[in-house]
Image: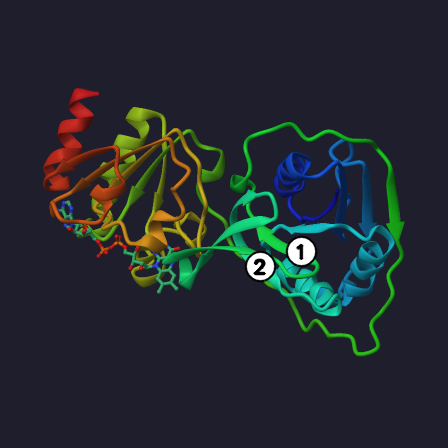
Amino acid sequence: MKALVLAESLDGQRDLCAGARQIADEVVLAVVKGAPQTGIADKAYDVELPEGEAAENAVAGVQAVYDAEQPDVVLIEPTPRNKILGGMVAAKAGASVISDVASFDGDTVTNMYFGGLAEMKQKATGAKFYTVAATAFQPGEATGTDTVETIAYTAPAKALVLKGTKEVPREGADLTKCDVVIGAGRGFAEEADLQMARDLAAKVGGELGCSRPLAENVDWMPRNLYIGVSGLNLAPKAYFALGISGQMQHMVGVTNAETIIAVNKDQNAPIFKQADYGIVGDLYKVIPALIEKL
Ligand SMILES: Cc1cc2nc3c(=O)[nH]c(=O)nc-3n(C[C@H](O)[C@H](O)[C@H](O)COP(=O)(O)OP(=O)(O)OC[C@H]3O[C@@H](n4cnc5c(N)ncnc54)[C@H](O)[C@@H]3O)c2cc1C
């Protein structure tokens, strides 16, 4: 069985190649505009995209890799650019992409539906294209050669014209790398009160993240730090959910956390169904008490 990994970030390349190795004998990596890492796949392709060209215009290069390799399965790192490119190649193969795959069991995959509200087990009919995060696989080593082939740019007949780009500001720690993450939710009444969560984070060697409303509704936290189906997917050793109700869209971002500790004043909050340790109480009293005890 051969897997083609279409990845973009350095971590995505390495982690998806390591995961692909668990389901395939042969692993091929394709990276658009950016040197592919070596030593993590049996062969890597550097798909060229000239400066100033929209990512979508690299589709002929990705298609060339697919045609040359004829993979049994395509694993796509779910970045905006790769979702489009993977979707275009899948469409040409007469297939649809199965998105947000959370686990594999042979040919059957489990993926998330309705923004993470439901899960479904399904088998691809025809070509197999999956968008998948590294957390769908057991941790493992990526191995491979330093063979890299360059695919020269071929402009599409009707190319998209890129009018401009704008850097998205990124702030705070890379939560995907943290062993301990503190998640702050709407239970905090004021932005300044988040200092309590930061103090707890400092005490336990963790970093602060949040639920989506804190990043999108009130702008108290940067958007790159919210956790959940449309945010970060984390696998920390410990996740503290402070004043977070535990809606499914948030919790799918921490299903791979080893231990979840929740603080919520409502004993019926859904978070307690998933928490390993739950404290029913006012976070304004519980957090200072925790900091004092730890
Ligand atoms: C398509 C879609 C995608 C989404 N994606 C995401 C996502 O990726 N990530 C995400 O987080 N959300 C996402 N959401 C939103 C999600 O459905 C929830 O609305 C959100 O997670 C709720 O955030 P919260 O738990 O902070 O707030 P709330 O649901 O308002 O919960 C606040 C909690 O704090 C508790 N509380 C209040 N005061 C105190 C106190 N003093 N002490 C202790 N506890 C207190 C309350 O009991 C309550 O349980 C998405 C929604 C949709 C529709």
Give the CA distance from mark 2 to mark 1: 8 Å
- Report whether residue 174 is seen: no
| Residue at 29% across, 60% down | 218
Quarter of the N terminus within the rendering: top right
First along the sequence among labels 2 and 1:
2
- Kind of element beneath mark 2: strand
Residue at which label 2 appears: 98
| Residue at 20% across, 45% down | 193
Q: Which quadrant holds residue 119?
A: bottom left
Q: Is mark 2 within 8 Å of ligand 1?
A: no
Tag on residue 269? none
Q: Position of residue 108 (x, y in %)?
A: 56, 49
Q: Which quadrant holds residue 276?
A: top left
Above/below status of 253 relative to 217: above
Q: How many residues crowd mark 1 within 10 Å: few (<14), some (14–19), many (20+)?
A: many
Q: Nearer the viewer, residue 224 or 259?
A: 259
Ligand 1 visible in quadrant:
bottom left
Give, as a three-letter code, the residue at label 1: Lys
- Kind of element beneath mark 1: strand
Above/below status of 263 relative to 164: above
Q: Nearer the viewer, residue 243 or 260?
A: 260
Q: How many residues crowd mark 2 within 10 Å: few (<14), some (14–19), many (20+)?
A: some
Proximity of marks 2 and 1: CB atoms separated by less than 8 Å: yes
Give, as a three-letter code, the residue at label 2: Ile
Above/below status of 154 relative to 269: below
Residue at which label 1 appears: 128
Q: Position of residue 164 (x, y in %)?
A: 66, 69
* Left-right relation of 82 to 225: right
